[in-house]
Amino acid sequence: MTLRFLGVCRLVAFVFLLWVTAGYHRTASAQVPVWDEVREQMRDPVFGRGRNHMGATILIDGYRDGTAPITFEPVTRPTQSVFWNPPFMRDTEKDGHFVFYAHATSEVWRPYRLKLMPKADGLLRLVFSSAGGGGIGGNYADYDFVQAWGHDFENGSFENLNEAGVPVGWGPHVLEGTRDQPMVIENPKEAVEGSRFIRVPSWRGYEKTIEVQKGETLTLTYWARMANLEEHFAIRIGLNPLMNASPVELKTKKGDLPEGGRLWSLNRWRAEWGPNPWSFHSASRSAGAQSLFLPATGDWQEYAVTITPVTEDEVIELELTLHAIRSIDRDQNHYRKVWVEYKNLSVEGGELESSDFDAGWKAVGRDPNGAKISVQDGETRLRTWYQAGKRGLVTNIKSGEPFTLRFEARTVQ
């Protein structure tokens, strides 16, 4: 009896394993997900935190003459992906507009396959892009070795460029007035095929139009990964102007930032270190909350950063947040701790309440006790990581006049 019972248990376990395996490789339903389903999938931790971490994004537009859009069904798609016709784009002209989100891992290339079934003859525009998100101007995705089986699909490895540096057979999909634009990276050691691949920011990228036939499956294959630009830096300093009547634009010119430094807008939808009603400026993307990114080593290095605020107010105050870069393990869905230590902070062209990181400073981040202050060799030092920073206030900064931050910093283990 015992042996027979164990045999039945083994059989049940085997059938269950087959069922789970089949479910993992299941094809997508022909029913395009409704908004509630997509929203729940975006919350699922397997995708990271919402679409910000789903990364690789293809915008798909089916159209003929603008009044008779081509709709289509997903036949198969990767696991950890969402194929979505946004409800706010369901009208006569945009019923053929779809967004395909797929989870991609930071700095690790993975292959993807997407099969679509057009419901009419016509043209299909594909934009290879990245989902919106926080960090440096949103997320960046890399693509290489793109193929459309059974269709004329030129230069899918982006090896051939025209005089403007745009891949032959592709067109740029850009937003005017924004700094973050798609680019071609030449690096034979990193490329999947050949020596080049594309790197595209949130909602911008490179596009291609192909002809499709009703009832003939379109199979797209490509390689993708997320490009974690913050990994190339160590220091991250938040700059959040406190406005009265108007937004504040923080401007820099050549020579104002240390070599290798960048000043970028924070996420358009949420300021990561406190609310900011003016966190985005459509014309320049440089108004309101900003983050300063700088490289650092294990040795102390002196930094000088000059910034000019422009606003209708004569004098402004600015919240200064000292911490470190955001380094994410996307597969494990947690932050890695990159530690940065600061000392000898001063401000020219403004007034800093305290330079000892104590009086007037407050802890910020999800690890408020993680930032440590110590005194060594008569110097006060502040030890931080991304989720453990300190925020102070700089006052009496005059609009139109530059102010300079000076400090020393290094990375620590």
Image (spheres, rainbow, N blue to C red):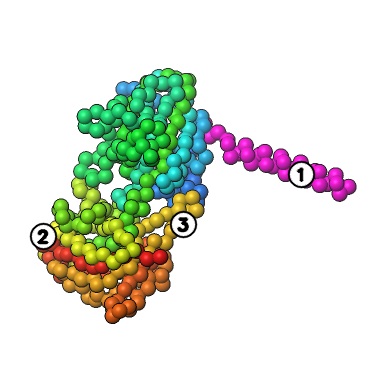
Looking at the image, residue 239 lies above or below residue 180? below
Q: Main secondary structure of the magenta part?
A: helix
Q: Which residue was labeled with disc 2?
A: 400
Image check: 382 left or right of 80? left
**Numbered circle sitting on residue 312:** none
Residue at horizontal 41%, vertical 35%? 192
Q: Quadrant of the C terminus?
A: bottom left
- Residue 73 at what x, y percent from top left? 47, 29
Q: Which of 90/234 is in front?
A: 234
- Residue 132 at what x, y percent from top left? 35, 46
How far apart are the two marked residues, 2 and 1, measured between alpha carbons? 76 Å
* Lower position in the chain sequence, tag 3 or tag 2: 3
**Numbered circle sitting on residue 10:** 1
Q: Which of 402/212 is in front?
A: 402
How far apart are the two marked residues, 3 and 2, measured between alpha carbons? 40 Å
Answer whether residue 68 is magenta in the image.
no
Q: Nearer the viewer, mark 2 or mark 1?
A: 1
Disc 2 vs disc 1: Cβ atoms closer than 8 Å?
no
* Residue numbers of the magenta segment: 1-30
Q: Which residue was labeled with disc 3?
A: 334
